[in-house]
Image (spheres, helix red, strand yellow):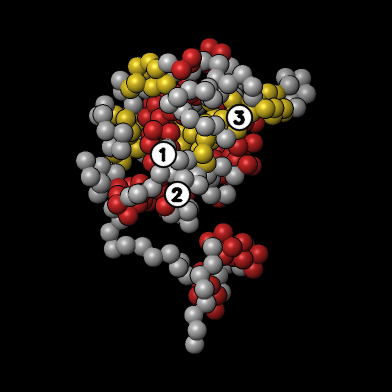
Amino acid sequence: MAQEEPRPAAEEEEEYEEELPAWSLPAAETGRIAIGTPWPDRVNREWAWGGSSGKGVTVCILDSGVEREHPLVGPVDGAVYVTVDKETDEVSVEEDEEGDLCGHGTACAGIVRALAPDCGIFSVRVLGAGYTGSGPVLLAGLRWAIEQGFDVINMSLSTTKRQFAEVLHELADSAYFKRTVLVASAHNMPVESYPWRFAAVISVGSHEEEDPQTFYYNPAPPVEFFARGVNLDVPWLGGETIQASGNSFATPHMSGMCALIMAKHPELTPFQLKSVLFLTASNVGGER
């Protein structure tokens, strides 16, 4: 009997959603959810991202904007800025002609570009000059980015205001089930902040080593991974570079690694991607 041709994961997932009940799986239907993707006996870095350049994956930089002309950033696929009217709560998403207002987003974009040179980069500006921002704008920008279906959203920012935590949690879960990967920086101080504390998010702290592909799994979450983030030369405003440290700059290292893996294995769900990151972490099975 001839075998059926394999179908794209997204097509199979759509069929599951339409025809299989979410609350129960009949015994006769188990064959329909077989995972057809071949996995190696041992997941290693060569299998995970060997030969990948990030091509075909779009990383959204949810930050202060991105300086389009910066030589260490390269082409930017698009850029918008988000505002929320304080009186009416009306959300406005407009094309961003100003670019980066403080340098932070450009630094993050440049780190992603260095790791995944062929990925797409899209800027969603939710911070103003002087790193100013608001919870409603952060929520609106994240919601818009999730709706666009970006593959990865880099969030090198957080909020300590608990009144925004519930909605952020809902948005993080929404992204997770839509197959958008949220990568968020832990706070640089030991305080409660969000969304990095949510399990649906890939949360990142920093380490001091110089190899940009060295990252560690943290066996004592909520911070899940440590990536390079100390004494980095990063792109900044005016085509310049500065030296900087912080979890903000460790986070795009993990976003870049996600882009490499997803470009080579576009069928992976966020859950599967986290598993690959764990198995290839430098203190688990990865090369150091």
Q: Is residue 149 visible?
A: yes
Disc 3 secondary structure class: strand
The earlier-in-sequence mark between 1 and 3 is: 3
Q: Nearer the viewer, residue 282 or 171?
A: 282
Q: Which residue is mark 1?
A: 116
The earlier-in-sequence mark between 2 and 3 is: 3
Residue 179, labelled with which disc? Answer: none
Q: Nearer the viewer, residue 164 or 73?
A: 73
Q: Which residue is at a point 39% across and 65% down the rendered structure image? A: 38
Residues at discs 2 and 1 in contact (Cβ within 8 Å): yes
**Alpha carbons under labels 2 and 1: distance apart:** 9 Å
143 horizontally vs 63: left or right: right
Specify the quadrant that holds the C terminus.
top left
Quarter-of-image position of residue 162 = top right
Q: Position of residue 113 (x, y in %)?
A: 43, 33
Q: Position of residue 136 (x, y in %)?
A: 64, 26
Q: Which residue is at a point 31% across and 41% down the rendered structure image? A: 217
Disc 1 secondary structure class: loop
Disc 2 secondary structure class: helix
Q: Nearer the viewer, residue 98 or 185?
A: 98
Q: Which residue is mark 2?
A: 263
Q: Position of residue 241 (x, y in %)?
A: 39, 17
Residues at discs 2 and 3 in contact (Cβ within 8 Å): no
Callout 2 environment at 10 Å: few (<14), some (14 to 19), or many (20+)? Answer: many
Q: Position of residue 65 (x, y in %)?
A: 55, 23
**Alpha carbons under labels 1 and 3: distance apart:** 19 Å
**Alpha carbons under labels 2 and 3: distance apart:** 22 Å
